[in-house]
Amino acid sequence: MLNRFSVKNSSFHYNNLGCYYKLLCNMVAVGFSKSLLKSKRNERHFHTSRYLSQSLVLGIETSCDDTGAAIVDSKGNIIGEALHSQLQTHLEMGGIIPPIARDLHIENISRIVETALQNADLEIKDLSAIAATVKPGMPLSLLVGTHFAKQLCKKSNIPFIPIHHMEAHALTARMVEKVDFPFLVLLASGGHCLLAVANKIDEFLLLGESIDNAPGEVLDKVARRLKLRNLPAFSTLSGGKAIEELAKQGDATAFEFGNQPMYKYNDCSFSFSGLRAKIHRHVEREEKNHNVEADQVLPSAANLCASFQHALFGHICRRLQRGMLYVDMKQMIPEGARKLVVSGGVACNSHFRKYLSIVCAEMGYTLVCPPPKLCTDNGIMIAWNGMEKWTAGVGVAKDIDAIDIEPKATLGINMIEDVRSCNISLKKKGIKLLPKKVKC
Ligand code: KG4
Ligand code: ZN
């Protein structure tokens, strides 16, 4: 659905090249595990033994453009971690090119897993289980982490736990804070936007999701269209982060975005393609008005960023508010214990968090935002999701060979039609997010 996972379509199809990746991953995993498995017992450092009495799970993440690995214990302590971001390469290429992302994962995965284990002062055989993202994500990228993890598990006779990337985002908050089930969760990233009720480790009710693009994907494209990389202070930032920073100098009421996306639909679905088209029209008009040269950044870029953020986050907040009214109507979460967990790269945005805190305060929710490092893709959230499953005894693969990647996978039980059928109107109930004429 979300076109990020097929951007810049190469003529490859992942199935055609399956053997090639298997071969590569086998080579990497075999070479890697030899070096880690051969270390002698008496070489083990003292502090390792502290952890051996409890469960330890290694998590591996390669669903998009970050190669991440981490080891966590059952109390949520991060024992070791490592991350390789491909951001700079993709910024230079003008977007994520799937075969390039795959090659970079292959180049880095062995080193990243090895570094995480070395930081933890652990060996493969000390692990209780290995978890890896198998869905959803870019197929070529998912294959690398999945095959690598499966090979390690088979070679060392360790259980394998396949992980749903969005479930891992949703439950990361439980590692750092006491968040009991059920709770509401909003995920906004470069690949997804969805609202769900988390009932159990492996039970989610999907209230709404994007019908077209993802918010991070659109922020990245808008940043590119505004040529923000040409400003030295923003040249190494993700599109969403660059827009957030520039918007701080802008006026969020400077540009109009007209009607809310999907305002006629009383459901919790999201849509970002219309907003994207509108900002592109604003940018074109502004470029003509200001006669900007090819590489020049518009003098009104800060106002455009602030106004766009307001429109985009305002849309998400309205759909969220309807979701909260639905939860109340159906009594899905007890009053007084209502929490909203947000995650995904876009949830790092401080302006978005401010809007979310306004909605939560009005609707009687406690807002739970994991630290930004845990909101963007990382190995820690995969390790923690693996640990929660390991502890609860759910989702451990019975037959490792039967596990395959699933590039497209929805989250939980689909309640979208039920939400729609409740026809919850926000007329006169819409929460005001911005006073007139303010700076972001
Ligand atoms: O969750 P994530 O690391 O990867 C995906 O699963 O997509 O999210 C990456 C996305 C990118 O689109 C990036 O532009 C956006 O998150 N992002 C932000 C911020 N930091 C990263 N968007 C808005 N504000 C930010 N501070
Ligand atoms: Zn993600």
Image: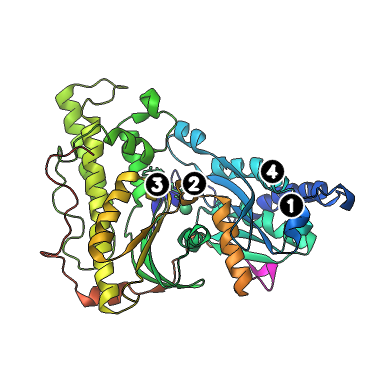
Q: Quadrant of residue 85?
A: top right
* 171 sits left or right of 427 in the view: right
Q: Earlier in the sequence, mark 3 or mark 4?
A: 4
**Residue at x-position 71% and y-position 45%:** 114
| Disc 2 residue: CB within 8 Å of ligand 1 | no
Residue bearing the label numbered 1 = 26
User: How many C-alpha atoms fall within 10 Å of the one at disc 2: few (<14), some, or many (≥20)?
Assistant: few
Label 3: which secondary element: helix
> How busy is the neighbourhood of tag 1: few (under 14 within 10 Å), some, or many (20 plus)?
some
Dot 2 amino acid type = Lys
**Label located before the other in sequence (1 or 2):** 1
Residue type, numbered disc 1: Asn
Q: Is residue 403 magenta?
A: yes
SS at badge 4: helix
Q: Can the viewer see residue 133 in this picture?
A: no
Q: Which residues are magenta?
A: 396-404
The kind of secondary structure element at disc 1 is helix
**Extreme residue toward the bottom, this view:** 330
Does label 3 or label 1 sit earlier along the sequence? 1
**Residue at 60% across, 74% down:** 392
Q: What residue would you read off at disc 2?
A: 373
Check residue 115 in the rendering and tell me which mark sits there, or answer none. 4
Residue drawn at x 22%, y 34% as measured from the top left: 250
Query: Between marks 3 and 4, how big is the CA–CA gap?
Result: 26 Å
Residues at circles 4 and 2 in contact by the CB criterion of under 8 Å: no
Q: CA distance from mark 1 to mark 2?
A: 30 Å
Give the image location of residue 322, x and y in percent.
24, 67
Question: Which residue position holds label 3?
Answer: 348
- Quick one: 125 or 32, which is closer to the camera? 125
